[in-house]
Image (cartoon, rainbow, N blue to C red):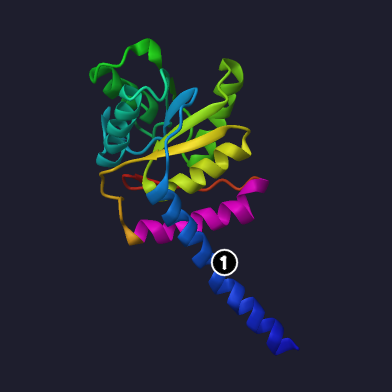
Amino acid sequence: MVRRIFRIFLILLIVFPLWCTTRIWWTGTHARAEQSDAIVVLGAAQFDGRPSAVLEARLQQALKVYQAHYSARIITVGAGAPGDHTTEADSSKRWLKSAGIPAGSIAALPQGRDTLQSIQAIQRYSEENRVRSVLIVTDPWHCLRAETMARDHGLKASCAPTKIGSTNGSIRYLIRETGAYLTYVTLGRVGIHLSDRGSSVAL
């Protein structure tokens, strides 16, 4: 009996993470953008106002979906690291303005040092500005967790994953995101904040 329980536990320990990895991969490779009240650009590292390669890839994708008329409003989100002179949200807004998007179409939320905090900032903004659906722009392997968090906070969510960037297709990133997603669905929904800033990559 004990051996049977141990075997079942061992199978679950292997199968559930593999199932999560498959879901993360599937969502990232089959994501479909939907018309939404706002496009959300999740933050990643910036260097004194200059977006990192990861953040710039997200901004380029946000520009594309904006120009394709998925939404007339963009929300940039992300705080600054200690010692920064600007924030991820403000750096993103400046980049989008320089690309020709009117300043009035962009709301910068300089809050959030991880995905959960960023989604919470978006929820607060959404409640005050009648935003019910969001099109999240982030890296492919990040789509599932970001969408899940947004839905848990009462938002209808879809994802427009980046097409280029150092994280795209990365097995290491996929494994890290599996761990982060598992932590969120098992513990995060009861208040665990995941620290997901690593060098220039935001999970």
Position of 104 compared to 194: left or right? left
Q: At x 25% / y 16%, what residue is drawn?
A: 100
Residue stretch in magenta: 172-190
Q: Position of residue 9 (x, y in %)?
A: 65, 77
Q: At x 30% / y 55%, what residue is drawn?
A: 169
| Front in this rendered view, residue 158 or 116 | 158
Q: Position of residue 118 (x, y in %)?
A: 50, 34
Q: Which residue is mark 1?
A: 16
| Front in this rendered view, residue 180 or 168 | 168
Can residue 70 be spotted in the picture? Answer: yes
Place residue 95 in its image quadrant: top left
- Amino acid type at circle 1 is Phe
Q: At x 62% / y 35%, what residue is drawn?
A: 153
| Front in this rendered view, residue 117 or 173 | 173
Place residue 33 in its image quadrant: top left
Label 1 secondary element: helix
Query: Given the current orientation, which residue lies at the most extreme right position?
Result: 1
Can residue 195 be spotted in the picture? Answer: no
Q: At x 25% / y 40%, what residue is drawn?
A: 53
Instruction: Look at the magenta stretch and give its main secondary structure.
Output: helix
